Image: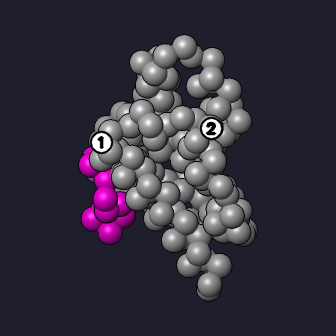
Amino acid sequence: MIKQLVTTAEIIDDLAFFDDWEERYQYIIDLGKELPAMADKLRTSERLVKGCQSNVWLDVDRADDKLLFAVDSDAYIVRGLLVLVLAAFNNKTATEIVSFDVDSYFKQLDLERHLSPTRGNGLRSIVAKIQALASASLAS
């Protein structure tokens, strides 16, 4: 599972530092390059997130009462978006995950306005999958 690369607060601050979206995209791509690759054995069709333009794999493990995610994609920008999502959800309890205000977070990043509709839909699919896993964890 992946260690926390950055926090949501760090991402918000870092993105606010850049003057234009080209620089922000480069920052997101650079975050994606820091994301450790997922083990090949985890890149299965069962772990593919449906609704994403690029291939996105998501795996979850539990440690104590926290959910730990392993993620990967075949596109650097998507890998960067995965880091943004992990900052919000990785190594958190299921309750923290389902109660996190992702809409407010994305609004602070001014992200969805600058993504293509298909990337935005994919991002929402990833978040929905993580929240569904957290909800299922709460129910069990």
Q: At x 62% / y 84%, what residue is drawn?
A: 139
Instruction: Say which residue appears at 65% left-offset and 32% top-offset.
Output: 12
Residue 136 position, x and y percent, is 56, 78
Residue under the image location 46 percent in, 41 percent down: 112
- In the rendering, at what x and y percent does residue 4 appear? 64, 43
**Which image quarter: residue 110?**
top right
Count neighbours of disc 1 (C-alpha within 10 A) and say few if under 14, some if 14 to 19, many if 20 or more: few
Which three-letter amino acid code belongs to the residue tagged 1? Asp
User: In the rendered image of this protein, does residue 44 appear above or below residue 31?
Assistant: below
Residue lying at the far top in this picture: please name it.
19
Judge whether 70 appears above or below 112 on screen: below
Residue 107: name its quadrant: top right
Specify few, some or many for label 2: CA neighbours under 10 Å numbering under 14, 14-19, or 20 or more. some
| Label drawn at residue 108 | 2
| Sequence-first tag of 1 and 2 | 1
Q: Give the range drawn in magenta.
A: 41-54
Residue at the disc numbered 1: 74
Which one is closest to the eye, mark 1 or mark 2? 2
Q: Is disc 1 placed on a helix, strand or loop?
A: loop
Task: Give the alpha-carbon distance from disc 1 to disc 2, as whole Å.
Answer: 27 Å
- Name the image quarter holding the C terminus: bottom right
Q: What number of labels is visible?
A: 2
What secondary structure is the stretch in magenta mostly built from?
loop
Secondary element under disc 2, as helix, strand or loop, is helix
